[in-house]
Image (cartoon, rainbow, N blue to C red):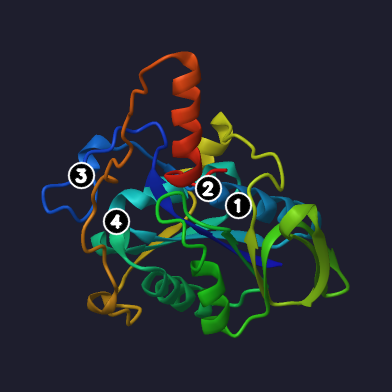
Amino acid sequence: MNIFVCLKQVGARDSALRIAVDRKWVEDEDLNFEMNEPDAFALEEGLRLKEKHGGEVVAVSAGPARAASTIREALAKGADRGILIEDDRFAQADALCIARALAAAVGREAHDLVLTGLQSDDFGFGQTGVIMAELLNLPHATIVMQVQAEDGGLRVKRELEAGWFQNVSMPLPALLTIQSGINKVRYATLMGIKRARKKPLVTHTAGELGIDMAASQTVRRLYLPHKTKQTQFITGSGKEAAAALLEKLKFEARAL
């Protein structure tokens, strides 16, 4: 089974965020970077499928040169090889642009299964995997909580609303977007880190894959939310204050 896992490098959750001077994004020098959390679960699921059914796991990422470290992390955990589509503009590119790049790289090779995380920790659109499926003409399932291979296809369990789940049978090749918590993510071992140095990592540019970065929609302005809350002090006796509070809850806050 040829499994391609799409990974994104995002700012670590404990990083201090400072808006850049042009107000388009945050200052990169203030950030520590890590693998997108849902993508880490997708990688783990791909590795488990490979261990059960054979084949290879290919880690694919579109991003700046620093995204190579995220691919190396995947290689250290057990992925067989990596593909980096390198361009600094991917850090702020929209889901369509990123999906086109990833689909162009994956579409060049034979693929049985493509895995992505449900959404990214930074933008959180949850669209990249679905757009990829359309571009690659693959059946897809989203918010996947369980994957089982069966008779040349898949049986997947999807999370729905209000605690409901849906079980779906799918043919291969297919694309799945993986929900966080589907499995327990492994750590890279010391031996795995050493082996990762010798595993192949191929780099392409956006131009080589025919991706027009100028067509990507970018962030126009980034700003902190405006504070709208106001504190009001109610004076008078307890009875008077209670009556005034009740009045405000009814007619100003409309909470009653």
Amino acid type, mark 1: Leu
Quarter that holds the C terminus: top right
Q: CA distance from mark 3 to mark 4?
A: 19 Å
Please name which of the two marks, 3 or 4, marks the residue nearer to the observer: 3
Q: Secondary structure at mark 2?
A: helix
Badge 1 vs badge 2, beta-carbon distance below 8 Å:
yes
- Tell me which numbered mark, 1 or 3, is placed earlier along the sequence: 3
Q: How much space separates mark 1 and mark 4, taking CA atoms?
A: 20 Å
Q: Which mark is residue 43?
A: 1
Q: Nearer the viewer, mark 2 or mark 3?
A: 3
Q: Nearer the viewer, mark 1 or mark 2?
A: 1
Where is residue 154 shown, x and y percent of the image? 80, 69
Q: Which residue is mark 3?
A: 19
Task: Give me the residue at 58% from left, 77% from top.
Answer: 133
Residue at point 44%, 38% (across, down): 248
Residue at image coords 50%, 68%? 127
* Left or right: residue 74 compared with residue 157: left
User: Residue under circle 2?
Assistant: 74
Q: Which residue is mark 4?
A: 64
Q: Secondary structure at mark 1?
A: helix
The residues tagged by marks 1 and 3 sit, at their Cα atoms, a distance apart of 31 Å
Q: CA distance from mark 2 to mark 3?
A: 30 Å
* Residue 238, horizontal then vertical, whole percent: 48, 15
Secondary structure under tag 3 reads loop
Q: Secondary structure at mark 4?
A: loop
